[in-house]
């Protein structure tokens, strides 16, 4: 077996530090290269993935009884994947972390436009629950770029942009905003190593003319202690020192990290500086950033927040789930799993460490999904309760007259049967006359007479049932009405019921006929009712009476 890492973010690969190096790690080739190259910059127990197979978009991997298919998607983490796992003719789909408003949104759109079929379980991330209201969206990376342009062109001094060096989309946005405003992007050695490790020469690199390399003092010590002189030389084509940075500060944007603070204070570069915070705001409020907050306050450095999430908004999560059409959805990567049931159908909640069986798509699951949808709609729109209560009161008033009309004033003439919907039962004494489940006429019950009309049904009656008789408020006992009834009666006697043109009508009629039989011994279909006991029927009867 092996461990699969969807993308190189610490909350996804951090526990590798506690896993034996003998266990293979499967991940994207570029993601693996990034982690390998940046590991020396971190503490000694920083997780370093062991070797293993590489994820390549839509190319399956065989792993024991499992078939693993990765799908490259849009996320703030570079080389990120959704993953489909197949075994025993079952499919589980892991969303990974994804979004649809980054520079690689087309990747997620591609998956949604051509989703895999027959997904039994969707493990769906929900990082934005509690962070974003329903139907609201995050700014795109293009929006971030435009906001950065506005700040850069109006900044009176050095612009400090505090963003993750591994958020490649954001680095691109910063670089593009620099180009539009004639600024030079200044990076450190760590960022230069990350950009090179992407393996993409279309992503800004340390040797591009619009980019400068500045090594802060703490990083210079690290280079000296680890003898990284060859690494430094490799990225030093555009290296500048603090004196040069001070001289061109108004024309520079520094990709800021807290380790820059001592250098900036020593060189007096904080005057007229603008600090752009471009990460999740929650990090800034943590105790680990208290010294940064104090520094900004002490030197009166203006803070501007320009950021967008690396995760999908609620509406995009819905689009993703609707495209994949899973039998069930299981919440992951969220602080609010209970919120899923307000948005999605057939949500199953499982605790960490809990084992459960993945079941294939089936009719029962589809029914459960439909029931869940209806229940949700009824709970969200409670207006129907009072409305139907009023209907019930009106129907009770008309109930006696309805029974008398149907049972005493005329009888049903097989194969024509009477039906009445709620609207007609509560307000008008009008019955539907049906043949094989299809409306063929309307009966109106007045105080002195019963009339029948085929208005609105004439074309269908002739096309489906070959009936030429047209009625407009003819009395039920009239010869023309009798001719209408005789026509439909004769249809049953014709071989194979050949005059009927719609097979669905016949099936519906057969089902209704079976359902109406009171003795199970006479039924063609057996066991079609739930196996309830006497108490269930009493409860149901009591509820109907109420």
Image (cartoon, grey):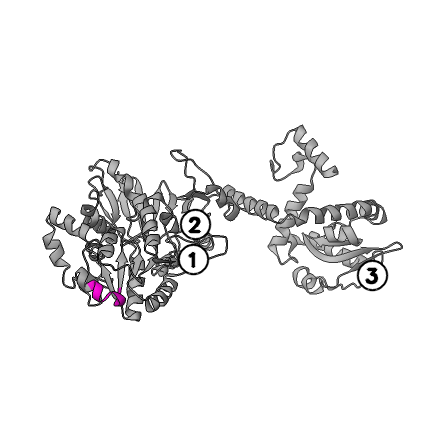
Residue at the (21%, 51%) spot, across then down: 33
How packed mark 1 is, by other alpha carbons closer than 10 Å (few <14, some 14-19, many 20 or more), is some
In the displayed structure, does residue 226 sit left or right of residue 119? left
Q: Give whichever of 107, 536 is nearer the camera.
A: 107
Distance of mark 1 from mark 2, alpha carbons?
A: 10 Å
Q: Secondary structure at mark 3?
A: strand
Q: Give whichever of 493, 340 is nearer the camera.
A: 340
Q: How far across and down, in percent of the image, does residue 393 sit?
A: 78, 46
Question: Quadrant of residue 200 in the image?
Answer: bottom left
According to the picture, the residue beneath numbered tag 3 turns out to be 474
> Looking at the figure, which quarter contains the C terminus?
top right
In the displayed structure, does residue 36 sit left or right of residue 542? left
Distance of mark 3 from mark 2, alpha carbons?
A: 65 Å
Q: How far across and down, in percent of the image, does residue 52 sit?
A: 21, 44
Q: Are marks 1 and 2 in contact (CB under 8 Å)?
A: yes
Residue at the (31%, 47%) spot, across then down: 291
According to the picture, the residue beneath numbered tag 2 turns out to be 128
Whichever of callouts 1 and 2 sits on the residue coming sooner in the sequence is 2
Whichever of callouts 3 and 2 sits on the residue coming sooner in the sequence is 2
How packed mark 3 is, by other alpha carbons closer than 10 Å (few <14, some 14-19, many 20 or more), is some
In the displayed structure, does residue 289 sit left or right of residue 129? left
User: Which range is magenta?
Assistant: 245-252
Whichever of callouts 1 and 3 sits on the residue coming sooner in the sequence is 1
Q: How far across and down, in percent of the image, does residue 484 sit?
A: 77, 59
Which mark is on residue 246? Answer: none
Q: How far across and down, in percent of the image, does residue 271 sit?
A: 29, 61
Question: Quadrant of residue 167 in the image?
Answer: bottom left
According to the picture, the residue beneath numbered tag 1 turns out to be 138
Residue at the (60%, 54%) spot, across then down: 503
């Amino acid at each position: 077996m092996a461990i699969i890492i969807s993308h190189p973010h610490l909350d996804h690969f951090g526990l590798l530090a506690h896993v034996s190096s003998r266990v293979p790690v499967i991940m994207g080739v570029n993601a693996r290269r990034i982690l390998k190259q940046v590991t020396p910059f971190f503490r000694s127990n920083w997780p370093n993935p062991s070797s293993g197979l590489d994820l390549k978009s839509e190319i399956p991997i065989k792993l024991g009884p499992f078939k693993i298919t990765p799908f490259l998607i849009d996320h703030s983490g570079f080389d990120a994947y959704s993953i489909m796992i197949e075994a025993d003719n079952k499919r589980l789909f892991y969303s990974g972390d994804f979004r649809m408003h980054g520079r690689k949104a087309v990747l997620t759109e591609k998956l949604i436009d051509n989703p895999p079929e027959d997904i039994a379980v969707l493990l769906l991330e929900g990082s934005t629950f509690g962070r974003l209201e329903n139907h609201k969206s995050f700014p795109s990376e293009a929006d971030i770029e435009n906001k950065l342009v506005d700040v850069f062109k109006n900044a009176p001094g050095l612009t400090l942009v505090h963003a993750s060096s591994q958020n490649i989309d954001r680095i691109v946005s910063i670089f593009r905003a620099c180009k539009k405003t004639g600024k030079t992007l200044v990076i450190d050695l760590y960022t230069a190593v990350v950009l090179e490790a992407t393996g993409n020469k279309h992503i800004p690199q340390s040797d591009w003319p619009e980019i400068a390399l500045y090594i802060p003092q703490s990083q210079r010590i690290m280079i000296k202690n680890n003898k990284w002189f060859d690494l430094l030389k490799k990225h030093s084509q555009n290296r500048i020192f603090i004196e040069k940075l001070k001289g061109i500060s108004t024309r520079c944007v520094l990709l800021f990290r807290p380790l820059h603070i001592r250098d900036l204070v020593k060189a007096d570069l904080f005057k007229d500086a603008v600090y752009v915070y471009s990460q999740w705001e929650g990090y800034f409020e943590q105790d680990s950033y208290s010294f940064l907050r104090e520094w900004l306050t002490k030197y009166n450095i203006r803070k501007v927040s320009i950021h967008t999430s690396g995760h999908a908004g609620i509406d995009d999560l819905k689009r993703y789930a609707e495209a994949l059409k899973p039998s069930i959805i299981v919440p992951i990567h969220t602080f609010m799993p209970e919120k899923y049931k307000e948005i999605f159908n057939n949500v199953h909640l499982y605790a960490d460490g809990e084992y459960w069986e993945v079941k294939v798509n089936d009719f029962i699951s589809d029914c459960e999904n439909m029931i869940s949808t209806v229940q949700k709609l009824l709970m969200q729109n409670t207006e129907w309760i009072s409305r139907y209560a009023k209907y019930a009161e009106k129907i009770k008033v008309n109930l006696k007259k309805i029974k008398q009309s149907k049972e005493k004033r005329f009888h049903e003439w097989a194969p024509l049967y009477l039906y009445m919907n709620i609207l007609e039962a509560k307000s008008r004494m009008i019955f539907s006359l049906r043949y094989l489940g299809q409306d063929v006429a309307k009966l109106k019950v007045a105080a002195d007479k019963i009339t029948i009309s085929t208005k609105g049904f004439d074309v269908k009656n002739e096309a489906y049932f070959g009936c030429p008789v047209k009625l407009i408020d003819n009395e039920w006992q009239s010869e023309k009405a009798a001719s209408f009834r005789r026509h439909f009666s004769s249809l049953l006697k014709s071989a194979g019921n050949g005059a009927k043109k719609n097979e669905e009508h016949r099936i519906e009629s057969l089902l209704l006929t079976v359902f109406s039989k009171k003795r199970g011994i006479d039924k063609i279909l057996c066991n079609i009712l739930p196996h309830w006991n006497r108490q269930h029927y009493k409860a149901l009867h009591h509820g109907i009476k109420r």
